[in-house]
């Protein structure tokens, strides 16, 4: 359906459904699939690979720590490229690389091949589902940015329950054949979704949030290149350059906060299922915990993004970090299956809420013009936390045959970041001269 907008140059027909919501939907699909096959699904492969080759958990975890190091190098370059060529080409390339990396894991025989394959998949995942997906959302939404980011991050909510697909494949076909099947399926699913993405709305005669064009906007239809509307120009004028942003205390404070959250998440993304197995859970029971926390993360994904449109994001950020710390305390003391529910609620809320929070804070604090580069640079700053955490958990287990000490360390890190969240004030925008 369509709607008419009356302007000085006549009537213009606009689509009833703002195209930005199609981008959000496509991003949800990409996020869902990657979460199933890699972000959460890799944990299903962890124990079979360790059992097959006899590698230590610390050695296997090192590959996931190294992928964070790779991300620190690739993310800024990726961000600069997105700011210039847009998200579609990045997502298409990332989708192909992700599938190729998954297929390469099916031919695994040595530890160095495992490291290279993990890095290849991580490179593809970053390009297909990382900054490019959120870059498009922050360009197409302004007033509704928090909600759009929250909805966009909610694609993975169903990934936990759908993890049975990976569990069934591994139990039926074995882990090698499962990697092959998932890699090929990745090409058929992600590449078509990548075609939906577009760059900034002004390039198609539209304004963020689907607002009616002002009198300065072009009358051309979707697919042509008009002159910039006044709102888009104001939005660009309120953006900091990369150098200006790097000179602000806000950038480094946010980066440290993101690092604390990354340290908790990156370690648990590798070791949650293995930990639950060590305390007596079956593979199916352990996988069901992932299902619980991904479903319950909807409170953080949708609620966190929505609340940040109305409440000071610093208070929301502090609350999310508090939930993360409390979740680790509960996790370290699980003795019965029912106790995974309060853990899943707290951890899921913290994990889900940080997904829209990161992009919202970076875009709101520094503007959207250089969002890709700045988002990538914040990821680079958090690299130490991302590298250390998986290895820390694996090393603690190898030394003590328990993950509990590592969980308490992550609790302290998350709690220490709460005061930083309350101090993270947005920088002053430079005065524009005419």
Image (spheres, grey):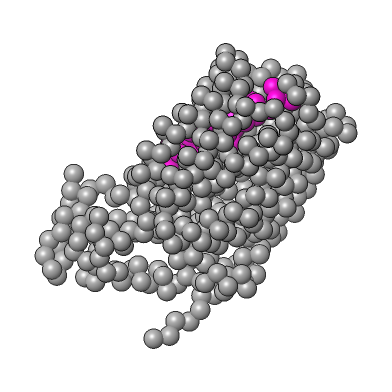
**Up/down of 375 relative to 182, above or below:** below
**Dominant secondary-structure state across the stretch colored magenta:** helix
Between 323 and 111, the one nearer to me in the picture: 111
Q: Residue 204 at what x, y percent from top left?
A: 28, 58
Between 403 and 84, the one nearer to me in the picture: 84
Answer with the quarter of the image where residue 378 lies: bottom right
Q: Quadrant of the C terminus?
A: bottom left
Q: Residue 62 at what x, y percent from top left?
A: 74, 40
Q: Residue 290 at what x, y percent from top left?
A: 61, 29
Asked if the stretch drawn in magenta spans residue 30, the answer is yes
**Is 171 situated left or right of 240 in this image?**
right
**Up/down of 14 relative to 406, above or below:** below
- Count all numbered tags in the image, as a single digit: 0
**Up/down of 214 relative to 290, above or below:** below
Task: Tell me which residue sits at (69%, 31%) in the image.
Answer: 272
**Up/down of 419 relative to 247, above or below:** above
Asked if the stretch drawn in magenta spans residue 18, the answer is no
Where are the magenta residues, as a range? 27-50
Task: Work out whether residue 316 can be spotted.
Answer: yes
Task: Tell me which residue sits at (51%, 79%) in the image.
Answer: 430
Task: Work out whether residue 301 can be spotted.
Answer: no
């Amino acid at each position: 359906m369509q709607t008419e907008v009356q302007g000085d140059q006549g009537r213009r027909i606009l689509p009833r459904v703002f195209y930005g919501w199609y981008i959000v939907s496509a991003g949800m699909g990409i996020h869902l699939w990657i979460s199933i096959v890699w972000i959460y699904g890799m944990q299903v492969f962890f124990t079979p690979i360790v059992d097959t080759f006899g590698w230590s958990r610390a050695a296997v975890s090192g590959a996931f720590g190294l992928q964070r190091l790779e991300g620190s190098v690739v993310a800024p370059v990726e961000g600069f490229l997105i700011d210039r060529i847009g998200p579609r080409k990045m997502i298409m390339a990332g989708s192909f690389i992700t599938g190729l990396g998954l297929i390469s894991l099916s031919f695994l025989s040595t530890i160095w091949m495992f490291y290279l394959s993990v890095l290849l998949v991580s490179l593809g995942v970053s390009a297909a589902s990382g900054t490019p997906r959120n870059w498009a959302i922050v360009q197409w939404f302004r007033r509704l940015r928090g909600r759009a980011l929250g909805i966009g991050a909610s694609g993975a909510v169903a990934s936990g329950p759908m993890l049975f697909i990976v569990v069934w494949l591994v139990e039926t076909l074995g882990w090698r054949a499962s990697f092959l099947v998932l890699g090929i399926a990745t090409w058929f699913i992600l590449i078509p979704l990548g075609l939906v993405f577009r760059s900034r709305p002004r390039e198609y005669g539209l304004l963020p949030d689907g607002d009616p064009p002002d009198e300065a906007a072009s009358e051309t239809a979707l697919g042509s290149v008009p002159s910039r509307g006044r709102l888009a120009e104001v939005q660009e004028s309120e953006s900091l350059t990369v150098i200006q942003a790097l000179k602000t205390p806000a950038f480094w404070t946010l980066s440290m906060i993101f690092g604390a959250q990354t340290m908790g998440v990156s370690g648990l993304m590798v070791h949650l299922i293995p930990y639950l197995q060590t305390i007596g859970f079956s593979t199916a029971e352990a996988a069901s915990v992932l299902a619980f926390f991904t479903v319950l993360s909807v409170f953080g994904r949708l609620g966190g993004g929505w609340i940040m449109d109305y409440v000071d994001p610093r208070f929301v950020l502090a609350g999310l970090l508090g939930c993360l710390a409390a979740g680790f305390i509960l996790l370290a003391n699980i003795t019965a299956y029912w106790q995974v529910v309060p853990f899943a609620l707290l951890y899921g809320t913290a994990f889900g809420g940080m997904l829209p929070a990161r992009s919202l804070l970076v875009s709101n604090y520094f503007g959207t013009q250089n969002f890709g580069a700045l988002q990538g640079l914040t990821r680079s700053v958090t690299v130490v936390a991302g590298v250390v955490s998986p290895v820390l958990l694996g090393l603690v287990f190898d030394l003590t045959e328990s993950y509990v000490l590592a969980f308490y360390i992550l609790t302290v890190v998350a709690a220490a970041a709460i005061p930083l969240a309350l101090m993270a004030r947005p920088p002053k925008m430079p005065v524009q001269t005419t």
